[in-house]
Image (cartoon, rainbow, N blue to C red):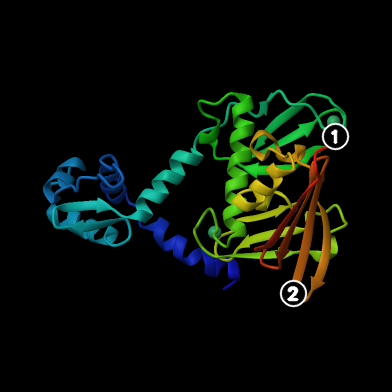
């Protein structure tokens, strides 16, 4: 068995349980009453009526197959499990059978390199900002957004939503938690890449396939101390897109284990963020220039 097949054994079993019409109907009947923590359990007889069954032997058999995986029995009846509701939420978010009707968006922002208007491109549920004039992907910024993220939002709001989402997700992943599956992450600083154009920070989930390659700033923008320090030197992170933030100078101060100093310099002062190989913030120093 290959690694890929090994990893697919659990999903195969879980998906296979739904490959029967009656089991699917039972699950949908439960989900139709699902109100998160306020879900009223459905009694056995209600559930049987909801799926139009009269043969209790057959009904019991399929109910039993779902038990523990997609539904559980409480004193008052049956409720969907967290696995069932997570699967349901994933379908609502990603709308797998729908084709997105917006693939080119006009968020109304200009290319930082050449000043031309940028296009938002939505492909395979990834959003990126591209410049048609100088052919750059702005801020090296490509991030997944479920199709549901396009609903009820203007083009500009979609861009803001993607950036917000990336910032929160990458911040969580930097602190060790996968934003998709809740598992642990591995953080790597490619110290040799500090002066290269390749994104120096790699964060990968140890369980699912969530992964990100990014520059030095984005992962730290959920840290309140970093935000306060940047604010003190005149960088209002909440009002900027990532590519509008000052680019930090990264200096490797140690290699075993890696330690990197990120220095952000503005007209109002200088912030030094010291981070280790796990991307924990070790120390922040703020040096504000005295105002004249
Ligand atoms: Zn351009
Ligand atoms: Zn994960």
Question: Which residue sits at x=82%, y=65%?
Answer: 252
Q: Which residue is mark 2?
A: 257
Residue 201 position in % (x across, y down): 73, 58
Which SS class for mark 2? loop
Q: Of 150 and 219, which appears nearest the observer?
A: 219
Which SS class for mark 1? loop
Residue 68 position in % (x across, y down): 29, 62
Residue 147 position in % (x across, y down): 54, 36
Quarter of the image with the N terminus is bottom right
Q: Which residue is mark 1?
A: 135
Mark 2 neighbour density, 10 Å: few (under 14) some (14–19) many (20 or more): few
The residue carrying mark 1 has its beta carbon less than 8 Å from ligand 1: yes
Work out whether 112 lies above or below 289.
above
Q: Of 200 and 84, which appears nearest the observer?
A: 200
Locate ligand 1 by image quadrant: top right
- Classify residue 198 as left or right of residue 45: right
Question: Which residue sits at x=77%, y=63%?
Answer: 260
Quarter occupied by residue 257: bottom right
Question: Which residue sits at x=52%, y=53%?
Answer: 180
Question: Which residue sits at x=77%, y=33%?
Answer: 130
Q: CA distance from mark 2 to mark 1?
A: 38 Å
Is residue 124 visible in the rendered image? The answer is no
Quarter occupied by residue 198: bottom right
Residue 131 position in % (x across, y down): 80, 31
Mark 1 neighbour density, 10 Å: few (under 14) some (14–19) many (20 or more): few
Work out whether 210 lies above or below 292.
below
């Amino acid at each position: 068995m290959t690694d890929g097949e090994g990893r697919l054994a659990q999903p195969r079993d879980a998906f296979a349980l739904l490959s029967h019409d009656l089991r699917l109907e039972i699950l949908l009947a439960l989900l139709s009453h699902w109100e998160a923590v306020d879900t009223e359990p459905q009694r056995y007889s209600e559930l049987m009526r909801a799926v139009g069954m009269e043969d209790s032997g057959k009904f019991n058999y399929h109910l039993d197959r779902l038990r523990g995986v997609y539904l559980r029995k409480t004193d008052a009846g049956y409720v969907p499990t967290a696995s069932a509701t997570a699967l349901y939420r994933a379908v609502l978010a990603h709308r797998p059978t729908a084709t997105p009707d917006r693939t080119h968006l006009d968020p109304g922002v200009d290319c930082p390199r050449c000043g031309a208007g940028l296009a938002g491109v939505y492909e395979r549920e990834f959003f990126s900002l591209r410049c048609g004039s100088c052919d750059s992907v702005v801020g090296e910024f490509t991030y997944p957004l479920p199709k549901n993220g396009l609903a009820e939002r203007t083009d500009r709001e979609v861009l803001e939503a993607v950036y917000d989402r990336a910032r929160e997700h990458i911040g969580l992943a930097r602190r060790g938690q996968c934003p998709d599956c809740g598992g642990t992450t591995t953080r790597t600083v490619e110290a040799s890449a500090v002066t290269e154009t390749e994104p120096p920070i790699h964060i990968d989930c140890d369980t699912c396939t969530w992964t990100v390659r990014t520059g030095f700033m984005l992962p730290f923008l959920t840290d309140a101390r970093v935000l306060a320090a940047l604010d003190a030197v005149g960088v209002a992170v909440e009002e900027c897109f990532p590519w509008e933030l000052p680019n930090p100078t990264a200096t490797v101060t140690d290699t075993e284990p890696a330690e990197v100093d990120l220095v952000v310099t503005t007209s109002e002062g200088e912030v030094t963020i010291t981070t280790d190989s796990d991307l924990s913030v070790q120390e922040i120093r703020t040096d504000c220039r005295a105002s004249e």
